[in-house]
Image: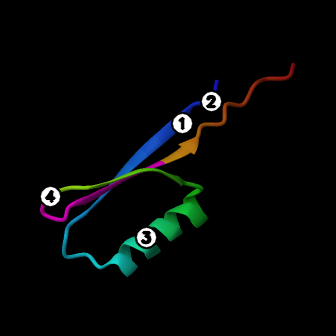
Amino acid sequence: MTEYEYQVLTFPRDVERSVVRQTLTDHAEYGHWELARTRLYLGGLRKVWLRRRIIRVRRTA
């Protein structure tokens, strides 16, 4: 079974789309995060859930 860890990023309404896009790109490239969910709330608050797989190392001996 695949396990994931999650990270939630919150962006207020005054943050430009280009800044949000660059932040998500940086997390994807350097942290190996992938987009799991995006919510846009009344008032302009944007929440983004990122996830990445948890890799468990097993002993071979």
What x and y, as percent, mark residue 60? 85, 23
Name the mark on residue 16. none
On-image quarter of the C terminus: top right
What x and y, as percent, mark residue 15? 25, 75
Residues marked 2 and 3 touching at CB (< 8 Å): no
Between marks 3 and 4 in the image, the one whose residue lies nearer the viewer: 4
- Alpha carbon distance from label 1 to label 2: 7 Å
Question: Residue under circle 1?
Answer: 4
The residue that appears at 37% across and 71% down in the rendered structure is: 20
Dot 3 amino acid type: Thr
Dot 2 amino acid type: Thr
Q: Classify 10 Å Cα crowding around label 3: few (below 14), some (14-19), many (20 and above).
A: few
Mark 3 vs 1, N-terminal side: 1
Question: Residue under circle 4?
Answer: 42
* Element under disc 3: helix
In depth, the one of 53 and 13 nearer the eye is 13
Residues shaded magenta: 42-50
